Image (cartoon, grey):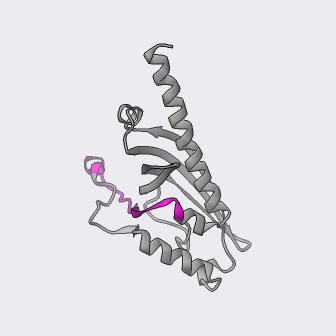
Amino acid sequence: MTVESMNNVKYLSLIKSVEDFLYFEADLLDERRYEEWLKLLSDDIRYRIPLRKNLRFSQSHRDISDENDMSWMDDDKETLVKRVTQIMTGVHWAEEPMSRASHLVTNIRIENVAEALEGASELFISSRALVHRSRLDTEVDFFIGRRKDILRVVPGGYQLASRTVILDQSTLLAKNLTIFL
């Protein structure tokens, strides 16, 4: 087996393990298994959904709010645990009755391939996500955008160390943002 073919096998194994992790995470969220989902998150996670801005072409490089600006969500592990705890009480007004969601994850890529193949401790992952949410009889929402994740390699798999979700919408038409993307 050549070095190139060994690297191809390593890469295919690595990307498959990343895909499996992200698909498993989507299943946990769809099935409302939030306590299990929280275990996939590192203790130092930053979970961020920045705002999109409608700007002229010459300013398009500034269309996503920066790290110190307003966001739809900018949470650490403690805040995510509180969100889950609140939802699971069954008295969360925006989630009673609970939303039904389907997370679709696609276009998964490892951005730091060379380092990842050498055994990097963190993988920089880009993907696209479409989340369909329905609630009651008439509430239907779509959240579509790019995700930038950092997966930390841990014994037995990965932990999500960082997620930035860059939604396509600049104005959310949903009544609330009580689901995780």
Q: Is residue 109 left or right of residue 118?
A: right
Q: Is residue 85 above or below residue 58?
A: below
Quarter of the view holding residue 91: bottom right
The picture places residue 108, in percent across and down from the top left corner, at 51, 41
The residue most toward the right is: 137
The picture places residue 98, in percent across and down from the top left corner, at 67, 74
Q: Is residue 122 visible?
A: yes
The residues colored magenta run: 39-61
Residue 178 shown in magenta: no
Q: Is residue 165 visible?
A: no
Q: Is residue 29 above or below residue 128?
A: below
Residue 52 shown in magenta: yes
The residue most toward the bottom is: 91
Q: Residue at x 54, y 51 (%)?
A: 129
Q: Is residue 42 left or right of residue 136?
A: left
Q: Is residue 63 above or below residue 134?
A: above
Q: In this rendered view, identify the residue nearer to me: 23 or 69.
A: 23
Q: Residue at x 28, y 49 (%)?
A: 61
Q: In this rendered view, identify the residue nearer to me: 53 or 98.
A: 98
